[in-house]
Image (spheres, grey):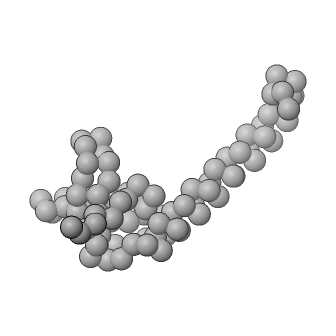
Amino acid sequence: MHIDELSLDELLDLNEQICLRIDYLRARNDMLMLSHLRLGQQVNFMAPEGRVFGTLIKLNKKSVVIVTEDKKQWKVPPALVNVVKSV
């Protein structure tokens, strides 16, 4: 398929299908990650300020809440969270 040959209506339809597929894949990835997370786990994620470490305090359908040692709370998508492994 060459997108240069598609009409505006065909491109809009293709765009809608792509967006739906992206939403589905993100939701599936979030659900998979949520199944591995437990309250009280030590986790980390990348923020604009750098890597943030904290404790998982709430699990939602589309986000998790993490509290850091300085009591700052972060609400992030589950797919961005990494569990900190004990050594």
14 lies above or below 78: above
Pick the front one: 85 or 38: 85
**Residue at (25, 43) in percent of width and height:** 50
**Residue at (51, 63) in percent of width and height:** 30
Query: Which quarter of the figure has residue 10?
Result: top right
Q: Number of numbered discs present?
A: 0
**Residue at (23, 58) in percent of width and height:** 53
Left or right of residue 28: residue 48: left
Look at the image and tell me whether residue 64 can be seen.
yes
Q: Could you say where residue 40 lies in the image, as x and y percent from the top left?
A: 26, 76
Q: In which quadrant will I find the C terminus?
A: bottom left
Q: Could you say where residue 25 lies in the image, as x and y percent from the top left?
A: 62, 56
Q: Could you say where residue 76 lies in the image, as x and y percent from the top left?
A: 38, 57
Query: Which quarter of the figure has residue 36?
Result: bottom left
Look at the image and tell me whether residue 67 can be seen.
no
Q: In which quadrant will I find the N terminus?
A: top right
10 lies above or below 41: above
Pick the front one: 68 or 38: 38
Q: Residue furthest bottom?
A: 39
Left or right of residue 75: residue 20: right
Q: Residue furthest left?
A: 70
Left or right of residue 27: residue 6: right
**Residue at (82, 22) in percent of width and height:** 4
Q: Residue furthest top?
A: 4
